[in-house]
């Protein structure tokens, strides 16, 4: 998460805090006009607080008990007036959006250190989820991953593998968790998900994206057709002076780029060139910044060789860990699994 986004959020918090405190002053003035005695009590309490502080600093504690008694009596009188007028005590307190941090974004820990409030953490997560371009991201994670929707039967004749779809997906999940845990290691390979539609490739990508966003990484998801079309349009200045103007920069520099549905795009020489540039640039880890890519495709390895030129396929084979998804379509099972 960039410092600019955090700064904008903290400015938003400061504005909310100021508004809550200004609204409180307005409520006080309206109330004091109706019940002047409350204004007198408030002024007396403020005066006693200043007097007590001065006495303590000057080493004079003889009148401390007397002042404390007067303060307690005034507070009781104030409570009684509020009760008689059916005014809740909270009416004379700021209505902060977050009662934990009082709209500052930060809280004090037990060792007096400053820590980010859960409300600010959630806002940062929400922004990251929106920027990732992935829907239902918060619901698709390793905790909601259900291995029971995958068959535990081995069908080597059908899939030509001596392992069940369930054990295969467990192995893939382990690879994905390892990918997350070692994300910042430049030697960690990218991921290439292959297999038919409805076998969990997108879900697994979302699981990884979810974990990395929680770690503060920037994640960008896009289908191959939209990605390549947008990149080309961007280079041709069709998006000049618009929000899409930085799209190409984001594609190259996002911590994690997820390219879904590779192989469904209508290819031409320009798109092949752009695809190679994207993959190759991200492999170079420019400016000492580690960037990773996940590619999801329905194509087999042979189909990839038949569809793309050798430069692209060599990058995939040499720098990506292959995860082959197989089994029955799980989408119907997901709907009907209790």
Image: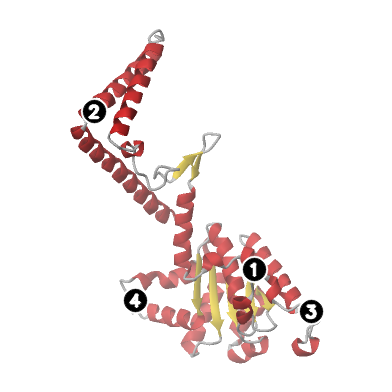
Q: Is residue 284 visible?
A: no
Q: Earlier in the sequence, mark 2 or mark 1?
A: 2
Outermost residue on the front side: it is 84
What is the x, y in percent for residue 130?
Answer: 45, 66
Report, in whole angstroms, how far the alpha carbon at label 4 lies from the one at label 1. Answer: 39 Å
The label shown at residue 1 is: none
Q: Measuring 19% from the left and 34% from the top, which residue is drawn there? A: 34
Q: How is the image coloured?
A: secondary structure
Residue assigned mark 2: 39
Q: Quadrant of the C terminus?
A: bottom right
Q: Earlier in the sequence, mark 4 or mark 3?
A: 3
Mark 1 lies on a secondary structure that is loop
Mark 4 lies on a secondary structure that is loop
Q: Earlier in the sequence, mark 2 or mark 4?
A: 2
Report, in whole angstroms, how far the alpha carbon at label 2 lies from the one at label 4. Answer: 59 Å
Report, in whole angstroms, how far the alpha carbon at label 3 lies from the one at label 1. Answer: 20 Å
Residue assigned mark 1: 145
Residue assigned mark 3: 163
- Of residues 211 and 164, the one nearer the viewer is 164
Q: Are circles 2 and 1 on residues that touch, CB within 8 Å?
A: no
Q: Is residue 238 left or right of residue 321?
A: left
What is the x, y in percent for residue 76?
Answer: 35, 24
């Amino acid at each position: 998460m960039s410092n600019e986004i955090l700064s904008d959020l903290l400015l938003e918090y400061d504005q909310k805090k100021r508004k809550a405190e200004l609204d409180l002053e307005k409520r006080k003035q309206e109330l004091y006009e109706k019940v002047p005695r409350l204004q007198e009590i408030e002024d007396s309490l403020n005066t006693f607080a200043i007097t007590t502080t001065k006495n303590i600093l000057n080493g004079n504690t003889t009148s401390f008990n007397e002042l404390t008694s007067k303060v307690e009596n005034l507070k009781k009188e104030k409570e009684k007036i509020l009760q008689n007028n059916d005014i809740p005590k909270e009416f004379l307190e700021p209505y902060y959006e977050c009662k934990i941090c009082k709209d500052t974004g930060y809280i004090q820990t037990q060792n007096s250190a400053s820590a980010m409030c859960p409300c600010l953490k959630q806002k940062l997560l929400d922004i990251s989820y929106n920027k990732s371009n992935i829907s239902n991201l918060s619901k698709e994670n390793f905790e909601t991953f259900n291995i029971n929707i995958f068959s535990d039967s081995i069908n080597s004749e059908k899939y030509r593998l001596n392992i069940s779809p369930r054990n295969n997906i467990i192995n893939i999940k382990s690879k994905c968790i390892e990918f997350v845990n070692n994300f910042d290691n430049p030697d960690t390979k990218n991921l290439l998900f292959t297999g038919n539609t409805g076998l969990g490739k997108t879900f697994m990508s979302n699981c990884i994206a979810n974990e990395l966003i929680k770690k503060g990484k920037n994640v960008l998801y896009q289908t191959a057709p939209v990605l390549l079309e947008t990149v080309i349009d961007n280079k041709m200045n069709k998006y000049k002076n618009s929000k899409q103007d930085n799209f190409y920069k984001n594609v190259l520099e996002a911590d994690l780029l997820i390219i879904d549905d590779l192989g469904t795009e209508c290819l031409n020489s320009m798109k092949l060139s752009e695809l190679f540039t994207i993959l190759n640039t991200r492999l170079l880890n420019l400016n000492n910044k580690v960037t990773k890519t996940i590619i999801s495709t329905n194509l087999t390895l042979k189909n990839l060789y038949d569809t793309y030129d050798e430069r692209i396929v060599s990058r995939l084979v040499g720098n990506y860990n292959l995860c082959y998804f197989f089994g029955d379509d799980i989408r119907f099972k997901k709907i009907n699994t209790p």
